[in-house]
Image: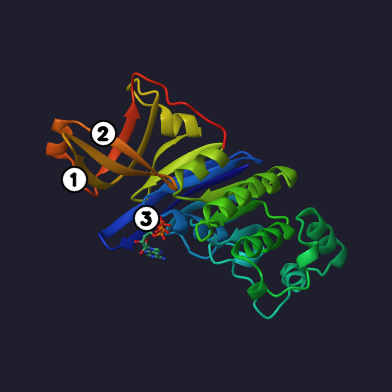
């Protein structure tokens, strides 16, 4: 079991605020931290990894105390069994894939590295240098390297945000696979709602340093009071008039949809507005691509 209860004063562009979080994780679960930029998500991961020191609090991981401000305990990062994956892969450029993995081990165990290369489908790339790999391949190596250390917690900070949508989808499946196969306890930071929905057991919504909502993705994202059967939040990209009707182009993930606006909408809506697109009377048709 993992418990953390920490606080730290953060100074952002809009003044200072308190990061104050109580979180418990059951082993084997995948929790996400979701929230606006600057809400404190990365700082919380860095606190867990021992890279940032909280002002006060307590962190206990599987019976071992990693941090306790009262008892003055603060384990250094290398003594905490965490696997960290960032957006920028952070592989060593002068080492091959295999060398990157070997270097990550506390005690060199080539057999274990070979086994992991096999399991993660990286055997064919083992002699390549990071610069010769695609972003998706580099991120798979970074994931393999993080898992190699048999972490008590795997911390993923926006690991897929630099990748295109197709690679992103594939790697989301791989993260889920890794998470289950190696029975990891994982915390993922992401601001991609679809990604969070697909991967999380529990979503924690962070706002100005506090968790304002926690629950399953369904509870957090779709438990609306209204009877909308179908809805998504997005931004108006353009509005144009065709004869007597107004059409708005609205982004929907990587797609665009065109929606008819009513007379009253025109009075209140403009390009750039954030809106909820919802269908009340009809269910949309879902067609397999
Ligand atoms: N060690 C620190 N001491 C004080 N303030 C900090 C420290 N680290 C980060 N901050 C501030 O805390 C705020 C939250 O930063 P953080 O990177 O955790 O946000 P985030 O939710 O991960 O944002 P993003 O989604 O943009 O990565 C920022 O305004 C940052 O400047």
Q: Position of residue 103 (x, y in %)?
A: 74, 72
Mark 1 vs mark 2: in front:
2
Asked which quadrant contains residue 80, the reply is bottom right
Q: Earlier in the sequence, mark 1 or mark 2?
A: 2
- Horizontal relation, residue 101 to residue 263: left or right: right
Looking at the image, residue 97 sits to the left or right of residue 215; the answer is right
Q: Judge: label 3 CB < 8 Å from ligand 1.
A: yes
- Quadrant location of the N terminus in the rendered image: top right
Which image quadrant: the C terminus?
top right
Tag in front: 3 or 1? 1
Q: Which residue is mark 1?
A: 270
Q: For mark 2, give the secondary structure.
A: strand
Q: Is residue 22 above or below residue 66?
A: above
Q: Nearer the viewer, residue 26 or 33?
A: 33
| Pointer 1 residue Cβ closer than 8 Å to ligand 1 | no
State the image quarter where residue 129 is shown.
bottom right
Q: Earlier in the sequence, mark 3 or mark 1?
A: 3
Would you say 153 lies left or right of 68 here?
right
274 versus 42 height, above or below: above
Tags 3 and 1 touching, CB below 8 Å = no
The earlier-in-sequence mark between 3 and 2 is: 3
- Measured as percent of width and height from the top left, residue 59 is found at 55, 51
List x then y, in percent, for residue 99. 76, 73
Please tell me whether residue 90 is drawn above or below residue 289 in the rendered image: below
In the image, farthest residue toward the bottom: 94
Question: Crowdedness of circle 3 by 10 Å Cα count: few (<14), some, many (20+)?
Answer: few
- Residue at horizontal 55 percent and vertical 57 percent from the top: 159
The reply to whether discs 3 and 2 touch (Cβ–Cβ < 8 Å) is: no
- Measure the C-alpha gap from mark 3 to mark 1: 24 Å
Q: Which residue is mark 3?
A: 37
- Pointer 2 residue: 260
């Amino acid at each position: 079991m993992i418990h953390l209860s920490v606080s730290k004063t953060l100074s952002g562009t809009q003044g200072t605020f308190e990061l104050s979080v109580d979180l418990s994780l059951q082993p084997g679960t995948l929790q996400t931290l979701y929230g606006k930029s600057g809400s404190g998500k990365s700082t919380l991961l860095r606190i867990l990894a021992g890279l940032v020191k909280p002002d006060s609090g307590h962190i206990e991981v599987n019976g071992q105390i990693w941090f306790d401000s009262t008892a003055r305990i603060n384990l250094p990062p290398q003594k905490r069994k965490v696997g960290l994956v960032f957006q920028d892969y952070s592989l060593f450029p002068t080492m091959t894939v295999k060398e990157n993995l070997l270097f990550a081990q506390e005690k060199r165990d080539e057999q274990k590295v070979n086994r992991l290369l096999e399991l993660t489908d990286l055997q064919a790339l083992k002699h390549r240098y990071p610069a010769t790999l695609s972003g998706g391949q580099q991120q798979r190596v970074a994931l393999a390297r993080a898992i190699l250390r048999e972490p008590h917690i795997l911390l993923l900070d926006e690991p897929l945000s630099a990748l295109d949508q197709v690679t992103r989808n594939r790697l989301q499946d791989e993260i889920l696979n890794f998470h289950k196969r190696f029975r990891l306890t994982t915390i993922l930071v992401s601001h991609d709602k679809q990604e969070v929905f697909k991967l999380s057991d529990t979503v924690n919504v962070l706002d100005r340093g506090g968790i304002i909502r926690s629950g399953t993705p369904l509870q957090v994202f779709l438990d609306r009071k209204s009877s909308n059967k179908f809805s998504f939040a997005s931004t108006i990209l353009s509005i144009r008039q065709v004869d007597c009707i107004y059409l708005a182009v609205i982004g929907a993930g990587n797609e665009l949809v065109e929606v008819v606006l009513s007379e009253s909408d025109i009075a209140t809506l403009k390009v750039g507005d954030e809106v909820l697109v919802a269908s009340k009377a009809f269910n949309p048709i879902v067609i397999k691509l």
